[in-house]
Image (cartoon, rainbow, N blue to C red):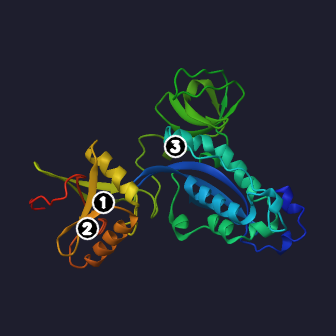
Amino acid sequence: MSSLPKQLRDESDFDQLPHDIPISATIADIEEKKGFIDYYRFVMEVRTRGGSKYLIYRRYSQFFNLHSELELKYSPGDQDLSGPNTCRLPTLPGKVFIGNKKEIAENRIPELNTYMKRLLGLPTWVLLDDAIRMFFYQTETDSQYQPRALRRLRPPTRRVVFDFSGSGRLELSMKAGEVIFLLRRVNTDWLEGTVRDRTGIFPESFVKIIKPLPESDSDGESGGASGKGAGSYSCLRCYLLTPQGVDTRDVCVEEDIATQPSYKELLARMRDVFKVDGNIALNYRDPEGDLVRLLDDGDVALMVADGRGQRSKVKRPVNQFPWELHVTAASDLSVYNTEI
């Protein structure tokens, strides 16, 4: 019982909690997800009161949505309204709108770990909230996905022998005596690792081996993570329609073909794919063959539904979305007479 948060150990009703209630969660790594919008998600190890542990995958936006829901329930804006069903929630790190996505995700790890530690240390009646239980619940998708790496759950593998001052953003500065968690071998002379919540590369000659790096973690190995979620891509057929002709692209994303992206995600992706700076419009062909303009998420839902309805009539590869996008200039309300 000594490993449990103090706030929980002091609660007399802790023993009455179900065994599947989460009592601790730690971020083990981050992974890039190349979907309609590229983003990073956090790989988290969750431990339950019953002693089980498992991995889940969450985006920052899911943390934000959870916190917003809990604020409405338990943290009234007017502190004078505090009552038996209110409590002081931990502080969630704020949104960051500008910057390198990977660096932002890496920098959030210590803050999010602290947030989860304090969240799961709240009174037991809060832990029974469905929003918290569902956030830390291992979904079927979570259980099927195999993580690429678990940097922060690995044992230390290198001890620093000499001080090393990195000369660039990619190099990891370190001091003699520090222990580095090794991630991978970059080449015959350089390694990548993490220490003090910083990640970078460093020369192997500056460290002493504690535990050998697994062969599969060296660059050049063909092996990789297996499983339904790893390396699984779906393709979206896209057309850029201009008076000069049609530019056709197949865009591959790490999304299930049942996924329904948002209008903003599709718009941003098409700008990037076709490298267009001007105002563009997204369109799709309905079952009658007419070009229909998309204006919001509701229109995207109709497009996806129409595509699924036509799946049996139109032959497409199994990993291709049943709907297609037609990109035009926003000012062009006509349909180009181009056969596709």
The picture places residue 262, in percent across and down from the top left corner, at 41, 60
- The answer to whether any part of residue 2 appears in the image is no
Q: In the displayed structure, does residue 20 sit left or right of residue 2?
A: left
Which residue is at a point 79% across and 69% down the rendered structure image? 125
Q: Amino acid at mark 2?
A: Pro
Which image quarter holds the N terminus? bottom right
Marked residue nearer the N-terminal end (1 or 2):
1
Q: Is residue 8 left or right of residue 140?
A: right
Image-quadrant location for residue 179: top right
The CA distance from mark 1 to mark 3 is 28 Å
- The residue carrying pointer 2 sits among few (fewer than 14), some (14 to 19) or many (20 or more) residues within 10 Å by Cα, namely few
Foreground: disc 1 or disc 2: 1
Q: Taking 47 as reference, is 309 above or below it?
A: below
Under circle 3, the secondary element is loop
Mark 1 touches mark 2? (CB < 8 Å): yes
Question: Is 196 left or right of 97, judged from the image as shown?
Answer: right
In the drawing, what numbered circle is on residue 235? 1
Between 188 and 249, the one lying in front of the other is 249
Gap between marks 2 and 3, in whole Å? 37 Å
Q: Which residue is mark 2?
A: 317
Residue on which disc 3 sits: 97
Looking at numbered disc 3 in the image, what kind of residue is underneath it?
Phe
What residue is drawn where x is 17% and y is 71%? 289
